[in-house]
Structure formats: structure tokens, C-alpha cells
Amino acid sequence: MSSLFRQSLVLTRAALAGIPRRAAVSLSMILSIALVVAVLSGFLAMAAGLGQTLRSGGSDDVAVILGGGGTQEITSSIPPDAVRGLTGLGAAAGIAVGPAGPLLGRELLVPVEVKAADGTPRTVSLRGMDAAGPVLRGTAMISSGRPFAPGSREIVVGARLARDLGVEAPGGTIRLGPLGWTVSGIVSASGGAAESEVWADLDAVRSAFDRQGEVQVLRVRLDGPNGLAELRAALPQVSATPLAALTEAEILAGQSARMERLVTHFGWPIAVLMAVGAIAGAVNTMASSVSDRTVEIATLRVLGFGRTAAFAATLTEALVLATVGAILGAFASFAILDGWQASTLGADGTQLAFGLAVTPTVLLQAGALALLVGALGGVFPAFAATRLPIVDALRGRA
């Protein structure tokens, strides 16, 4: 064991043993770092939860066709000739074919206002779809009740949205727009975005909202690994309108990346500003530690302990306090925030429900910031500990 290491270990033990004497100022540093960790973890957990919700249910076997050159369903428009052309081509366009014909479904997305269980209004996505629509969503399943009946004003409500609206079981009525709709079923989608939507028959939605003949999205089941390439090659043949085909996984990955960036870019600056304040508190704490141990450090210096050992001991104390704060903040974040239900505006301007996810990656990022705060807060007092005037410090003991 090297002499420097032994000296640093002795000084570090002495510094840590003195923490109870400085309990108040040490606790303030721990709590300020814990708060930084909790705040950053909250934003990162929000981003992680949004990402998990948006990515959940994405399939590489299902393609979404959008029209008009956009990448958002709400702004898309599919001309009738494209629907007829793709239906006629079927397998030649890379679309899987079932007993009833090509596995293709038309969809229309309408933002509608509805009242939550507490009476507050919220905007949700009412998705009109053909009977094949639910079948083209592999991870979504009717967990209670049955699918909507074609041509009727029946709806299937996402599980998370149903909880927010106070819908406990099928059979009730919800007012969407000018009309009341009967809840025929509740859909679960492994926490995916479908749990924040309302599904209904396409023609019924068109009629209720005066959107006759309108189609915004085509959803198709791909016929094998080459299906997407064949579908993209067929799109220019069926319509002069620019059409784009992406897999569900690609669309959901793009949406999740945008939302995660938005939340993360908002959360990090706030956490960094709080960290600056925490650094100031850490500097004060460690300066108090050095002041409290002035005579002790000077005495050990006279006995042959080096400057580097004094520096290492003070910096280690700061990192220990920062680690305690990081653990406290991480525990509080996980206990309080993990699984917390929240909602935000989705890509189409409607409410998207999701659960916060305090993942290991979230905790590692927040913990790294905490250690950085401890290091920056301890380095200057640690340097000051190496510059103590030995003679003056020893006279202070008398």
C-alpha cells in the first residue's frame, strides 16, 4: 500500500468522522443534491414513460399509409382512387390477403372534447375505422365487452382513458361531439397509445362529424419481409397524390423520439440551474468542513502528511455526501414517481395518457449529475485545504 494512499485514507476517515459535528450544513448539502436528482429524474422519467407508451404496440408487419406529403395522421388525406387501387392490387402491392380480401383498413381521426370523471374537459382522439381496424393492431385486444358494431354509434374506449372518464364497464353512454355513443368494449394495448383513444365505426364517425368520404390513414398488413418495398413501389401507380408508407414501428419510434427530446430538452436546463445552486451549497459545506478541521490538517501536515492527501480527503468527503444525496433522491423518485399516471398533448393535439418510468438509465443520469455537483462543490475547498498556512493554523489551537 503506497504512502500516499495510506495518508489519504487516514485523512478521509478523520474527515468523515467529523461529519456529525457539522450535521446541519452537511444535511443541507445532501438535501439540495437529493432535490436536484429528484427533479431531473422526474423529467427523465416523463420522457422514458412517453417513449415506452408511444413505442408500445409498434409492429414491423403493419404499414401505415399517409397522404399529402406529411407525417402526421391528423394532416393526412388519402384519395378514393388510392384506396380502390390498393384494394385491387392486393398481394401485388405487398398487402397480405385473407379470406375476405386484402387486409386493409381505412381510418379517420377526429379530435373531440369529452368530460373526465372529475368534470374537467379534455380532448381525445376518436378514431373511425373499418371492421378490420382492430384486427390490424396486434398488441391491442378487447379486454372487456365486444368490438363496435358496423354502422352503429358504438365505441371501444382505451383502458387508460376509460379510467379517466370513470367508465368501469361496457354499457354506459359517453357524449362525443353532438351525439351520445354507447360503450361496447374496453381495449387494452400493453400500455400503448391505443389505450388513450376511442374507436368507432368509420361511417358512423363520418356521419356524426360531417366528414363524408374522408379517409386520413390506410393501415395494411404486409405480405412477408418484402411487403413494405412492394407497397412503396405500388403507391405511385395508384394515385397522383404523394403517398408515404411506414411501418407502425417506424412511425411510433419517430413520435417517441420527438416527444422524448422535447421533455428532455426542457428538463435538463432546469436541473442544471438547480445544480448551480447545489454547487454553491456544496462549496459552503466543504469550506465549513475545512475550517472545522484546520488544526487537525495542520497537525497531520507537520507529521509528514502531504498536500495531495489533504486534497483527496476533502474531495472524497464531498463525493460521499453527494452519493448519499443521490441515493436519497433516487429512492424518493422511484417510490413516488415510478408508475405515476400523467397525460400530455400527443402529436395530433389530443390527450395522451402515460405512466412515468424511473428506469435504471434515468437514475444513472441523475446520479451522474449529483456526483458532478459534489465534485465541483468539493474541488475548491479541497484545494484550499492544501494551502493552509501550517504555523498560523497551529497557533489557532492555543
Image (cartoon, grey):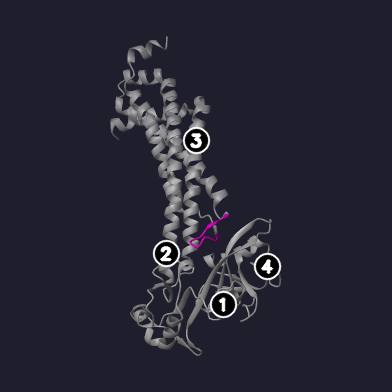
Q: Position of residue 93 (x, y in %)?
A: 38, 84
Q: Nearer the viewer, mark 1 or mark 3?
A: 1
Mark closest to the chain's N terminus, 1 or 3:
3
**Amino acid type at mark 3:** Ser
**Which quadrant holds the N terminus?**
top left
Q: Which residue is mark 2?
A: 253
- Answer whether residue 343 is magenta in the image: yes
Q: CA distance from mark 1 to mark 3?
A: 54 Å
Identify the residue at horizontal 44%, vertical 26% (top origin). 284
Q: Read off the magenta span.
A: 341-352
Q: How far is disc 3 from disc 4 in space, using C-alphas? A: 47 Å
**Residue placed most toward the observer, 317 or 234:** 234
Which of the labelled discs sits on residue 370, or is there none? none
Q: Determine if residue 192 is in view.
A: no
| Residue to which mark 3 is pinned | 32
Kindly report the distance in space between the C-alpha atoms of the residues bearing marks 4 and 1. Answer: 18 Å
Q: Residue at x 54, y 80 (%)?
A: 130
Mark pair 1, 2: CA separation: 26 Å
